[in-house]
Amino acid sequence: MNDTHVAAPGTLDAYRRVTVVGAGVIGSSWTALFLAKGLTVTVTDPMPGVEQLVHEQLRQAVPTLHALGLPTADLERNLRFEADLGKAVADADVVQENGPERLDVKQDLFARIEGAARPDALLLSSTSGIRATDIAQALKQPERLVIGHPFNPPHLIPLVEVVPGEKTDREVVERAVAFYTALGKKPQVLRKEVPGFVANRLQAALFREAVNLVVEGVVTESELDGIVTSSVGLRWAVAGPFRSFHLGGGTGGLPHFLEHLGPGLEGLWRDLGAPVFDEATVRLLSGQAQFGASIEELEAARDKAQIKVLQAVSEPSAATGEPAQQRDASEA
Amino acid sequence: MNDTHVAAPGTLDAYRRVTVVGAGVIGSSWTALFLAKGLTVTVTDPMPGVEQLVHEQLRQAVPTLHALGLPTADLERNLRFEADLGKAVADADVVQENGPERLDVKQDLFARIEGAARPDALLLSSTSGIRATDIAQALKQPERLVIGHPFNPPHLIPLVEVVPGEKTDREVVERAVAFYTALGKKPQVLRKEVPGFVANRLQAALFREAVNLVVEGVVTESELDGIVTSSVGLRWAVAGPFRSFHLGGGTGGLPHFLEHLGPGLEGLWRDLGAPVFDEATVRLLSGQAQFGASIEELEAARDKAQIKVLQAVSEPSAATGEPAQQRDASEA
């Protein structure tokens, strides 16, 4: 095993030099986090004016990084730009790719990355919808590639879905998990490649019924949002759906819950709507999208609230020394 | 209008005497909140030993009430028990019913309540699944009844879904909203009666896909829960699904989001699973329901975390004086 892998567990020692390929919103957010964690970052993107765009995105990320307790002074000290993809990745410990969501583009990018990067560099793609198995068909060593899909924005929201392809090496998956964990993220390895991975599928499932309820005139968009933030959203910030229903089953837990409330749930499942985005639906949904403030104001308010909630769930409990948010049994 | 309605807006002055009909988990939790808010509560339930059960539930609610900043000293000072339903409701300003979830039982209860309560008493049902229209068929004045369905437990989670039946008087709806608002809850009036109302339908929609992903072996229950609490759960604690996607659309907001990501969402909708609770599925789900601690320990940890999150979202922001959680435009 290469020397660069020999690093204390839980540290970023083996991952000092990161190359960010593609500097849109996701790539810039990764860049902000990597820099705030003390890593050296090379950004590569053929887009004209990319340096200005990244500077601007970093500037916008500073208040959030600061609120999360990360150092932000002289954030760009370890940042450089390199338009040539081969040169940009030649020296990298980690490559985090955030290019356009097209299979042919990703295959081309990773074929060139593979040809120029060190053989032990960790190759990660932020894609939200393309399988590692498919991208890796363009690689000589398909076992090197793994998906590291962040929930947007990566400098704020903890989840990274780590999704191996059919040929991804187990050691690559382990290194990806080690890297993201040392970075303070919450990586979760998926056991199968499915379209949309897990978080976006769950989000899509809830949103489908949300659209149905607005189309049916049961509530407006704002009313539905208020229902979510005052009930299920609060719940799911601290306990996921299975744990919540486990605790909803009294001393009998989830088995008791399923036995007694399963039939009622199945009844609701049969009644859920199946809307489509036809012209009338899009017009209705777009027309209701008035949230009483500009996008910038809403975004600033949301980020401020999000940071408070993140602090609340990650605060160690006085009683146990554990974060307030419940850990999986596997971590206990 | 009766004198008891003449009270300062936003106060509980018109709702001093509350009768809780049915003292199971929901009824006891309502009782705890009503008492902590200084109301006089009469509990009526024919179940033998109900007094002991309520005492025990109140005792368990005290740490939560305390953490929410509510007074808990001598909580039972204004609590009394009255087995006779007619006597229990005779003097009430508000009746909150929490009996068994059977239409015939609710119809019988409300027919008796209507016959014994003052003509101006507010008649509320906590039902999660029965329509006010159906219950009210047993009433002489069906316009008096409205659903006030809490998200469990009502002493902790803010949402109350206020669901009028076809004949419910608008003024009854307004008084229900005024009562719950003065109580510190977040009431939301639904514009149509639909099975499961809104929060439980959204919960069912997400849970269906959660079950599908576990059945398909993509993740375990614990892994799925961890994904939710580190991504969508955090998001939906501060911004509902429409506002989140509005902000996910950049400067173009939700219309831009729907135009560009709508087709992808529709693709995911088509791919979502439709599991059923057959024997094999129930066995799989029940078998995985191991969360590394006892129900009591999990519950205590969840409640502690839930309180921290509630405090985080209700803390006034230094900048705006508004709660951190974003308000609906209609409230802004």
Image (spheres, coloured by chain):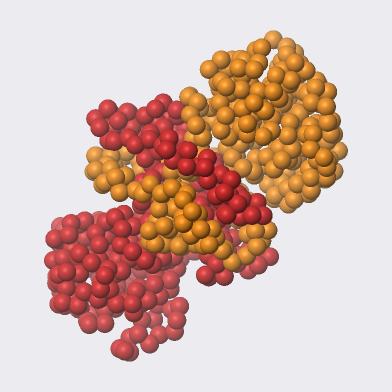
Chain colours: A orange, B red
Which quarter of the rendering shows the C terminus of chain B? bottom right
Q: Position of residue B331 (x, y in %)?
A: 53, 70
Residue that sits furthest to the top in the current view = A1
Q: Is residue A26 left or right of residue B307?
A: right
Q: Is residue B172 visible to us here?
A: yes
Q: Position of residue A92 (x, y in %)?
A: 77, 23
Q: Position of residue A10 (x, y in %)?
A: 66, 27
Image point (52%, 42%), residue name: B263
Dividing the picture into quadrants, the one containing residue A297 is bottom right
Q: Is residue B40 left or right of residue A231?
A: left
Depth check: give the residue in front, A21 or B55: A21
Image point (46%, 51%), residue name: A278
In the image, is residue B204 above or below residue A215? above
Q: Position of residue A255 (x, y in %)?
A: 28, 36
Which quarter of the rendering shows the N terminus of chain B? bottom left
In the image, is residue A43 above or below residue B177? above
Tally the numbered discs.
0
Q: Is residue B87 visible to us here?
A: no
Depth check: give the residue in front, A184 or A113: A113
Depth check: give the residue in front, B296 or B118: B118
Image point (71%, 37%), residue name: A27
